[in-house]
């Protein structure tokens, strides 16, 4: 009788543990559901489309901007690859285990240099596009960019008020 009770308890315990493991499995996701960050990208795409419509670009301007974009994107491939390589170099130093201050600092400086190059490339591209526009289009560009940045500034103020940002 005691042996039967122990056997039943063991089977029940196993069943409970097994069901808990089954329930802990990640749920299958719907491949059509939006991925994180996609909503933001969608909004940015809508902003660009709206901006292009507002600017009423000539065919020549559209072609020039398209050419600038291709050149910019090609440049960004190289800049992002450099950044990724520099990050891997730092990771390699960390994995090696015997950290040397000057090597780690040099690796971090290379990463920062890569990030700076990307930031400058983005800024230069934006200004290159801006220079293609007529003065009236530039005015529309500034107003629209300001509206977009205004939302970001609002978020920054919110962080500041909560003491999260100085």
Image (cartoon, grey):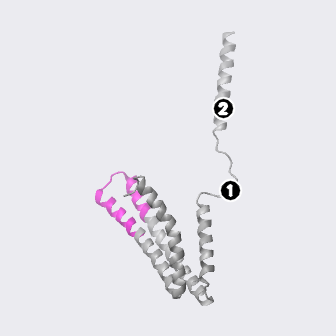
Outermost residue on the top side: it is 1
| Residue 82 vertical placement versus 55 (above, below) | above
Q: Where is residue 127 in the image (x, y as percent from the top left)?
A: 47, 81
- Position of 120 compared to 48: left or right? left
Quarter of the picture holding the N terminus: top right
Quarter of the picture holding the C terminus: bottom left
Q: Is residue 91 magenta?
A: yes
Q: Which residue is drawn at 68% across and 28% down?
A: 15
Q: Position of residue 103 (x, y in %)?
A: 32, 60
- Residue wearing tag 2: 18
Give the structural element (helix, strand or loop) at label 1.
Answer: loop
Residue stretch rendered in magenta on the structure: 86-114
- Position of 58 compared to 111: left or right? right
Which of marks 1 and 2 precedes in the sequence?
A: 2
Q: Where is residue 46 in the image (x, y as percent from the top left)?
A: 63, 70
Q: Is the magenta stretch mostly helix, strand or loop?
A: helix
Q: Nearer the viewer, residue 136 or 46?
A: 136
- Position of 110 compared to 24: left or right? left
- Residue wearing tag 1: 33
| Residue 38 vertical placement versus 67 (above, below) | above
Give me the C-alpha separation between circle 2 and circle 1: 30 Å
Q: Which of 42 and 23 is in front in this view?
A: 42
| Label 1: how many Cα within 10 Å (few below 14, some 14–19, many 20+) | few
Give the structural element (helix, strand or loop) at label 2.
Answer: helix
- Position of 31 compared to 73: left or right? right
Q: Which residue is drawn at 59% across and 74% down?
A: 48
Outermost residue on the bottom side: it is 60
Q: Is residue 100 magenta?
A: yes
Q: Which residue is drawn at 60% across and 90% down?
A: 60
| Residue 101 vertical placement versus 123 (above, below) | above
């Amino acid at each position: 009788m005691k042996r039967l009770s122990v056997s039943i308890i063991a089977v029940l315990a196993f069943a409970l543990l097994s069901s808990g493991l089954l329930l802990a499995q990640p749920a299958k996701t719907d491949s059509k559901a939006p991925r994180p960050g996609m909503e933001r990208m969608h909004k940015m795409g809508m902003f660009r489309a709206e901006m292009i419509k507002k600017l009423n670009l000539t065919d020549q301007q559209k072609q020039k901007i398209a050419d600038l974009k291709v050149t910019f994107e090609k440049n960004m491939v190289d800049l992002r690859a450099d950044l990724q390589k520099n990050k891997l170099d730092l990771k390699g130093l960390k994995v090696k285990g015997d950290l040397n201050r000057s090597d780690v600092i040099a690796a971090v400086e290379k990463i920062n240099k890569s990030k700076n190059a990307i930031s400058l490339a983005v800024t230069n591209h934006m200004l290159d596009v801006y220079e293609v526009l007529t003065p009236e289009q530039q005015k529309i560009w500034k107003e629209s960019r300001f509206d977009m940045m205004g939302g970001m500034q609002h978020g920054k103020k919110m962080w500041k008020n909560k003491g999260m940002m100085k």
